[in-house]
Amino acid sequence: MTRDTTNAFGSLDGEERDALLSAYALGELEGAERDAIERLLADPAATGARQLVADSRAVAAALRQARADEPPARSADLRRAVVAALAATTGASAPRPASRPARRRLSGWLPLAGALAATLLVAVTLSQTAMYREVAHLSKNAPRAEARPPVLSPAMPRNAVPAPERFVVPEPAPTMGRAVGNADRVRRLAPPRGPIDRPEAAEWESRDRYARFDENRFLAVADRPLSTFSIDVDTASYAVVRRFLAAGRLPPADAVRIEEFVNYFRYSYPQPAGNEPFAVSLEAADCPWHSGHRLVRIGIAGREIDRRERPAGNLVFLIDVSGSMNQPDKLPLVKQALAMLVEQLTENDRVAIVTYAGDAGLKLPPTSGDEKRTILDAIDGLVAGGSTHGSAGITLAYEQAREEFISGGANRVILCTDGDLNVGITSDTALVELIKEKAREGTFLTVLGFGQGNLQDEKMEKLADNGNGVYAYVDGAREARKVLVEQLTGSTITIAKDVKIQVEFNPAQVTSYRLLGYENRRLADADFRDDTKDAGEIGAGHTVTALYEIVPAGGDAPAAGAEPLKYQAEQPRAAESAAQGPASRELLTVKLRFKQPEGTESVLREFPLADQGGRFAEASADTRFAAAVAAFGMILRSSPSKGEATLPMVADIASAALGADEGGYRAEFLDLVRKAESLRAREPR
């Protein structure tokens, strides 16, 4: 443990320290206390602290599920029950006696916590199947829980009823630092996190919908010297895959989008000069998974804006409260996430809340951001039930946004849903046209996905892309804080829109190339100069990264190229065309077009790159870490282009390129790599 971390907690006894860690696990800490805990958890030596946070989340999830039919508990009562259960399982001293009113509030929780703790102790010595039955028996006979309906897994169809012995609890939120590596111990202590021994489990998983796509191939420069695509700052794919790995399952290939993996992380790219909205940095190095190939990294950094300079916000929370959201990792997590955002608002902001389920409703008229209690009470009062009339809710939300429109402000609808819009306008085309029209009028759309089992990932990504907004997936309180607090300014302030990239390769230096990811962001080359073609947006402080794998001139090109022409002479090939043009040692030129947030005409910028022949080990930490993340995605997709990439190689590259790692997200990536390696090892040969 570092000196600073030790000093921060040196005055606390073990019980007080554990209580703080449990409070953090339940999302109760803020400000300096939360920051101190996160510094502690990021310390490589703080294994025990990370384990306690993971265990607290697992036990809290079990307690909430066992009392799902009861009114929500006070957070302090839940925390005491969690500490009591953990104390019983570890032999630690019990929490200090509570006050008389607190003891009365805990009267319904502590027996359940004690029973859970006893079962957890027994479970360690039982076989896995026997343990599940023991926990199921406890949950069935826990105090005041006999009459509650069967618990449905988030992955089940709504009309499915699990067998009584198959108790299901939600998976805990992802943990800090290296805690994911301790997930096996958590599973031994906690009830199972998914349906057990159900042959139809694969059918339940199929309710999630991910867009199918073919990976980018190598293209011959002689035939295709231009590569054109729209930038993307979505990050949902990485969080979705993290959820799968944390639950002990490998993700489906189509859930893995390489660009969203790479762009999940912040990179220390230089800031723009003057009034430019962003800066561009380029780097080339050896490709770690293909000997003889080169890897090019394109980095774009959006201009940072101090949070205190954030323009006034006109925000409409559009919340899905349909029956499909009645799961612990859906509406309850939505409430927790939005409460974090509300704490960041000021008197300059206006907030409205619209819900949809059967009929759309205005739950909170536009309210000043400094009336936090009023806004939080409206959020707390949300309950799930009914079918999902999504289009009616979207229409009402945009009406509210129009009525409070702030010229020059951040006008945005924030949609929170699992994406299951099954009543009303269900046509993707009709919804997209509605959202595109509103985006042209100046109101953008941010989409936050929640839950599993019927996650309509494909639809949500499409809506956000056409609404000039961001699509993120929230798999826990920590991700909610990252998206809605840490990235608040970038998520609500667009500094450049319709940002397109076109890379022109020099045939004298490059034989063929492949863009890693961005398959659903590809544009026709002619679209680059067409200002009527929509593209991606960059928010304040956002970074965007793109990687190309390149075969140098004279290399063994994987691309087959076009078939020989029958009726006309062949076009000059690489070396010949290079000889006809001006000699250049430039590898490529990156061209960017973008519009100002209120503009209609694009501006062009160009950035050439001359390859200096650097080795991969000499590349910047950002380039090496981005390469490791991309290789991880290719391995999870079983990509035919992954070459010599292996999970141990990914771990070695990433561990040497952690850098400052603010927030511990890169260390968490290492945990996911090791988890994937463990799951791959169990696969049948």
Image: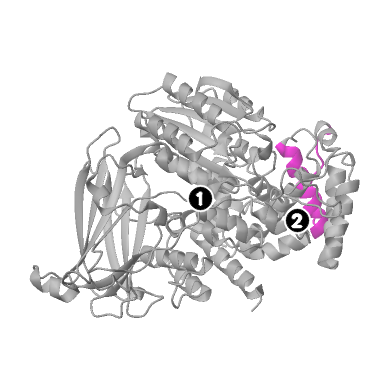
Please tell me which residue is depicted at 44% across the width and 37% down the height of the picture.
432
Q: Is residue 564 above or below residue 99?
A: below
Q: Secondary structure at mark 1?
A: helix
Q: Which residue is mark 2?
A: 195
1, 339: nearer the viewer: 339
Q: Which residue is mark 1?
A: 236
Q: Which residues are magenta?
A: 75-100
Q: Say if the magenta span includes residue 102.
A: no
Left or right of residue 428, residue 380 in this image: right
* Rendered location of residue 662, percent (x, y): 46, 55
Quadrant where the N terminus is found in the figure? bottom right
Q: Amino acid at mark 2?
A: Pro
157, 482: nearer the viewer: 157
Task: Identify the mark at residue 345; answer none if there is no mark.
Answer: none
Q: Is residue 489 above or below residue 443?
A: below
* Label 2 crowd (10 A; few <14 / some 14-19 / many >=20): many
As drawn, which residue projects farthest toward the front? 567
* Rendered location of residue 246, percent (x, y): 63, 59
Q: Is residue 288 above or below residue 365?
A: below
- Picture mark count: 2
Q: Secondary structure at mark 2?
A: loop
* Rendered location of residue 447, percent (x, y): 50, 40
